[in-house]
Image (tube, rainbow, N blue to C red):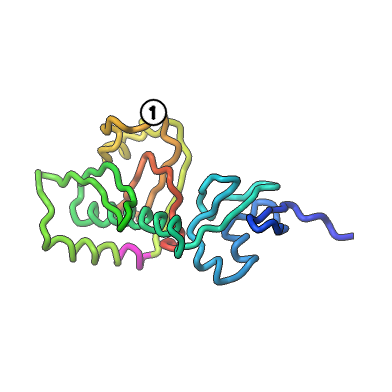
Amino acid sequence: MADAPALTISLVDGSTRDLAKGASALDLAASIGRRLAKDAVAVEVDGEVRDLELPLTENATVRIITRDSDQGREILRHSTAHVLAQAVRRLWPGTQYAIGPAITDGFYYDFELPGGAHFTDDDLPRIESAMREIIAESQPFVREEHSSSASRAGTGVVRRTLRPKCPSAPRSFRSTATATTSSTCAVDLMCRRPIDWAFSH
């Protein structure tokens, strides 16, 4: 008699899937179909939206979020905002940045350029070109979980962001989402949103 599956996952349509212990939502999507795995950007697990690469838990109810949905487009825009932050820091080393949310028709970041500099219309093609280069580099997004005290203790990171100065900043940092190279990084100390991992592959 074959061993019982290590993990049983329920889908929102009422069906179930058997997966190996430690399987991620991306593994689940791939088990359903290659197209779904390609289009997936995040997953909803028991009502909570999470990254695709986090491991699933037994008896969870799961919905795969694809990039052609409203929710998927919001996640894609949020991920692109992270790339924007890295591109600006690559072009203007020493730039500080605050919030970078997705909005109805796109995304933005609040920046403070070094030396009191300001953006001009001529800068937009340079920024777009730098973003395309970063995406082509297939850099990994890395999420690390830290307590508030541990996040604040990383002063080398805190100095790079204006966000701890924002009056609306929550008291507890839940996670850090980082897009890194060996010499350049864009660190968001309070990123709570899933990342579209397709940027990394």
Residue 106 in the image: state x and y as whole percent: 30, 57
Of the 4 image quadrants, the one containing the N terminus is bottom right
Residue at 36% x, 35% y: name it.
154
Residue 60 in the image: state x and y as whole percent: 66, 48
Task: Say if 178 sits above or below 38 in the image.
Answer: above
Stretch of the chain drawn in magenta: 133-137
Instruction: Provide the secondary structure element on which disc 1 rests.
Output: loop
Residue at 39% x, 49% y: name it.
178
Task: Say if 11 sits above or below 153 in the image.
Answer: below
Of the 4 image quadrants, the one containing the C terminus is bottom left
Q: Is residue 99 left or right of residue 93?
A: right
Q: Residues within 10 Å of mark 1 (few under 14, many from 20)?
A: few
Residue 29 in the image: state x and y as whole percent: 59, 63
Nearer to the camera, 169 or 176: 169
Residue at the spot of label 1: 171
Residue 141 is inside the magenta segment: no
Image-quadrant location for residue 81: bottom left
Residue 134 is inside the magenta segment: yes
Nearer to the camera, 30 or 101: 101
Residue 20 in the image: state x and y as whole percent: 70, 56
Nearer to the camera, 62 or 194: 62
Q: Is residue 11 left or right of residue 163?
A: right
Task: Say if 50 sits above or below 128 in the image.
Answer: above
* Magenta segment main secondary structure: helix
Nearer to the camera, 152 or 84: 84
Please state which amino acid type lies under the numbered disc 1.
Arg
Residue at 62% x, 50% y: name it.
56
Count of marks placed on residues: 1
Residue at 38% x, 55% y: name it.
79
